[in-house]
Image (tube, coloured by chain):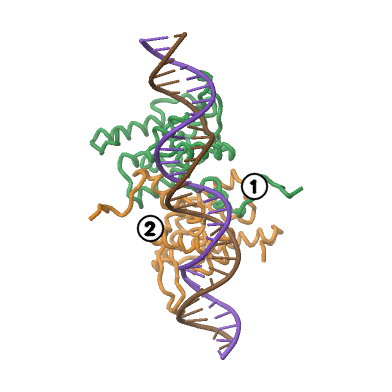
Chain colours: A orange, B green, C purple, D brown
Amino acid sequence: MAAEKEETAHRSGCPINLTLEVLGDKWSLIIVRDMMFGNRRHFRELLAQNEEGIASNILADRLRRLLAEGVISKEDDPSHKQKAIYSLTEKGIELLPVFAMIGAWGRKWLPVTEELSIRAQLLEEGGPALWEGFMEELREEHLGTPPARPRVGPSVRERLYAAYMEVMARGAPLPPP
Amino acid sequence: MAAEKEETAHRSGCPINLTLEVLGDKWSLIIVRDMMFGNRRHFRELLAQNEEGIASNILADRLRRLLAEGVISKEDDPSHKQKAIYSLTEKGIELLPVFAMIGAWGRKWLPVTEELSIRAQLLEEGGPALWEGFMEELREEHLGTPPARPRVGPSVRERLYAAYMEVMARGAPLPPP
DNA sequence: AATTCCAATTGCATTTTGCAACTGGTTGCA
DNA sequence: TGCAACCAGTTGCAAAATGCAATTGGAATT
């Protein structure tokens, strides 16, 4: 028998490198972003509502990989025999601070549009306290974890969405119908 | 004449997406990491001392792209007519918090080796105050910015390197000769 | 019974990656 | 002065990844 000692061979044991081996392409984090901030849980939602126009074969491939890496999980939708529900795992939820930092950097240095960067701005201004609140919400939604204490007022996701809508209402260029 | 209205076409104006368009591959951040934490400034250093074994054509291509994106800069080495010195720009230096978060995530969730993750651990424990100190050092080294106030004691880079050597001395597996 | 919805898969052309060898020039040393 | 080592890449080529459009087989809706 040939050797197959471990799961996969890695280029190195450096945390930066290993993260890039898992997430270092142009689509994986886009999908996690849509699940996290856009609350997309089905293949169709991820495909049709994606801002960047991901192709269905790429989406299927990346979902498979993220699943294999334990960043997301997949289960049957009880109401539809052929619908699958994708959820973030704790490993995936904890990518939030990474998104916050990447978003802040992109907002500062790249030609972002206002309506798509307002969420990044709020996340940056809210800091770790807001991140933790959002992660708690994600644990409720994706892991079924009961809330430590009942929430008062709108959720972080609702606040992010409200800010987005407000920018849009102020006359930001409309996204394609 | 055909239309060529802007520099490049983007998939969307989302900060996450734009960052991925610039850095979303398996090598770009590896190169920035080596420049930032390993103090590699020449092509040969980046090529030969790279832990993951980058190929020279990939390295040349990524340096070209990072240069075009303004993440790094390039100048002639006055001492060697054919040596080029690569430096981080402010835009590149400000990737440090992104590295800190990615490193923390990788350290928690991926099979890192101790000797290659000790730096990530120190960066995580040091928090934003340490990051700012390191970024100040990088501005001195790469931008020539005079220090706001003279440094006392070892630099952040020296401290990170000392911790790495200490782990190695404790008997971590040796890297290949 | 027909249409729409669902999560993908297939075929194919294009692009990117990875590997090894090589290039034209410069520098250091005997 | 000559030669080896060093420098920043480039070249050629095979393999893999990506992008696009069309399609699949079954399930829910009307």
Left or right: B99, with A167 as reference point:
left
Q: Can residue A158 be spotted in the picture? A: yes
Q: How far apart are marks 1 and 2 (CA)?
A: 33 Å
Which residue has dot 1 on it? Answer: B8
**Label 2: few (<14), some or many (≥20) within 10 Å?**
some
Q: Which chain carries label 1?
A: B
The residue closer to the viewer here, A40 or A28, is A28
Q: Is A169 above or below relative to A123?
A: below
x%, y% of residue B75? 56, 27
Please name which of the two marks, 1 or 2, marks the residue nearer to the observer.
Answer: 1
The amino acid beneath tag 2 is Glu
Image quarter (top left, top right, bottom left or bottom right) of the C terminus of chain B? top left
Is the residue A110 above or below the residue A71 in the image?
above
Q: In this view, does A76 lie to the left or right of B74?
A: left
The dot on residue B107 is none
**Mark 2: which secondary structure?**
loop
> Where is residue B53 drawn, in percent x and y?
39, 39
Q: Are marks 1 and 2 in contact (CB under 8 Å)?
A: no
Tell me the quarter of the picture where residue A68 sits.
Answer: bottom left
Q: A118 above or below B174?
A: below
Asked which secondary structure carries label 1, the reply is loop
Q: Which mark is residue A69?
A: 2
Query: Residue placed at 67% from the left, 63% from the top?
Result: A176
Q: Find residue B89 and report its horizontal and vertical position in percent.
A: 55, 34
In this orientation, does residue A101 appear? no
Q: Which of D18 and B68 is in front in this view?
A: D18
Front residue (pair A76, A134): A76
Residue B39 x, y percent position in the rendering: 44, 31
Give me the residue at 53% from left, 19% from top: B78
Question: Label 1: few (<14), some or many (≥20) within 10 Å?
Answer: few
Type of amino acid under label 1: Thr
Q: Disc 2 is attached to a residue of which chain?
A: A
